[in-house]
Structure formats: C-alpha cells, structure tokens
Image (tube, rainbow, N blue to C red):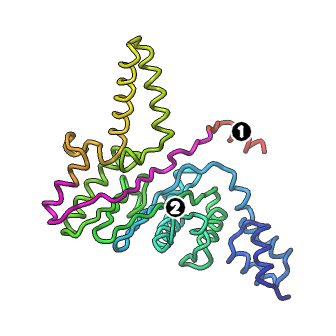
Amino acid sequence: MAYTAADVKKLREKTGAGMMDCKKALDESDGDFAAAEDALRVKGLAAAAKKSSRTAAEGLVGVAVEGTKGVAVEVNSETDFVAKNDQFQDFVRSTTQVALGAANDDVEALKQAAYPAGGTVGDALTNNVATIGENQQLRRMKTVSVSDGVVVPYMHNAAAPNLGKIGVLVALESEGDKAKLEDLGKQIAMHIAAAFPMALTADDLDPELIERERKVAAEKAAESGKPAEVQAKMVDGAVNKFAKENALLSQVFVMDNKTPIAQVVEQAGKDVGAKVVLKDYVRFQLGEGIEKEESDFAAEVAAAVGG
C-alpha cells in the first residue's frame, strides 16, 4: 500500500511522533495508516505530545562560537537527570551548532532547520521526548557577532564542554591582538556569570523595571517624612544606583572590586594595541523566569502505586 508526504504529515500531527519515525512506521506497515499509528503507540513514540504540558525548568544551556559569531541556546527538561543523558547532551550540542547558521534568534525557525542526523531540529526534539520520557522545550536562543574582534564563550560549572547551567558569550569589537582579546573576554565573561547584569548599559534596562524601582524608592522616601524636594533627590539617587549596579558597563569588575567594566575595556585597548568596544553579551541561566511546579513526591508515589 502506497503513502504520500501528506500521510506522513498527518500521522505526525496525530501522534506527535517525529517525522522520520512516522515515515519508518508507514514503511513498515506498507502504508497502512492505522497500523502505523498503532506501531508508534507500541513503541511509546506517540506519547510525546502528551508530555508537552509538564513543566520543564531543568536541562542545559549550550554555547558555540564560529569565527566572529556566537550563539547561546537553552533547552529545558523536567528533571536534572536528563541533563546527564548522552542523548540529550548530543541534542543540545547539535542544536546549538545548527543555531550558528540561523539568520535571526527565531526559535520556531530553528525548530524547522535541518538536523544533522536527519529530519528537523523539531523532529529530533519530539523523538527525544518520546524516547527519554520527559517533556523538553527548546526555549530560547541569542546570537552575537562582531565585524572584527572576538566572541568569547564561557560556561560556568560545565556539565560537558560548552554545556551547563550558566552560559555566557562576550562580543569584543577590536582590531587588536586576538589572543589578548580572548583573555579579556574570558575575564569579563566570568564577571557576567557572577554579577548577573540585566543590560549592557543603563539606557538598555527595561523601562518597566526602572519604573518599578522608582515606585519602590518613592514609597521609601515618603516614609522618611522629609521635604518633597529631598524625597525627589532620594528617589533619583536610588534609581541611578539601581541602574549603575545592573548595567554591565557600569558594574564594578569582580576581579578587583573597584574598576567599572567600561574602564576595564578602555584600559585593555593599550594592552591589545587598538581600541576595544564591548559590543554585546549573552548570559543564559538555566530556567530563569520559569515558575516550577511544587510536587508532593509521597503523593505521586502513592498515586502511582494505587493506579
């Protein structure tokens, strides 16, 4: 019995299994759609879509650099155990490499990109969910690049080369000595991992975040009972302090606890032999911003035994 590409697509949409798995199932069932669907269910591949509602806040961050371009990718799983799984690590590593060739930071477009082992990145992800047995999500990606200079990767507490829980990229634009720029980038990357800047400059900070800080500062100032003009200065001072402490270029370098990052970069120009510009950076910390579901392990075990 023959089958078409439309049949493969239909089987994939109905079961949630990967494209290559659907094609193989139809091959083995001589094109019998119902038999192919049953085969996928027997193998557990059709269950992948059902796992997509479970919270995924663990996993891995991957970083990769090629020439003057770098990318960071976060892939989430439900438990930390999966981060140690070779199949999952290979997927994150391969997907990060694929992301290097992306035109923009569109995660949905990345899912449609060709995967090295065949099919698409999305197909490989669906297959992972089915075979590993946990919900997994390709959450985000960010690319940085320079026209001349270096992009330096850093992974804090790496689980494997370029894979871990806090991934950093530093983009330094300069015509100077590349080896010395690499050393500078590594130091700044370590600072970024530790200091958690929210933006490159104060002007880049989220306006809503600044407004929230202003409201908090205003409430505190009002409690002081001081004159209005003094309160206004207190508020401005508090907001400026917040911006200074959370913008990378104005943060104090953790290596010496006194020099602003902007000054560190400027001074480095003398050492590398040309002006250095910290053009951009990425700091991905695994699971940041994801609300984890609280689970009652004893209750889950009791339910499993009872069911």
On whether residue 291 falls in the magenta region, the answer is yes
Q: Residue at x 23, y 61 (%)?
A: 276
Q: Which residue is the site of mark 2?
A: 85
Task: Pinpoint residue 269: horizontal percent, then vertical percent.
Answer: 17, 60
Q: Which residue is the site of mark 1?
A: 302
| 60 vs 142, nearest the viewer | 142
Instruction: Work out whether mark 1 precedes mark 2 in sequence or the reverse, and give the earlier one.
Output: 2
Residue at the top extreme, as displayed = 225
| 16 vs 241, nearest the viewer | 241
Q: Which residues are magenta?
A: 266-293
Q: Secondary structure at mark 1?
A: helix
Q: Residue at x 48, y 34 (%)?
A: 211
Q: Left or right of 224: which side holds 300? A: right
On whether residue 24 falls in the magenta region, the answer is no
Residue at the bottom extreme, as displayed = 2
Do tag 1 and tag 2 residues touch (Cβ < 8 Å)? no
Q: Secondary structure at mark 2?
A: loop
Q: Which is more foreground, mark 1 or mark 2? A: 2
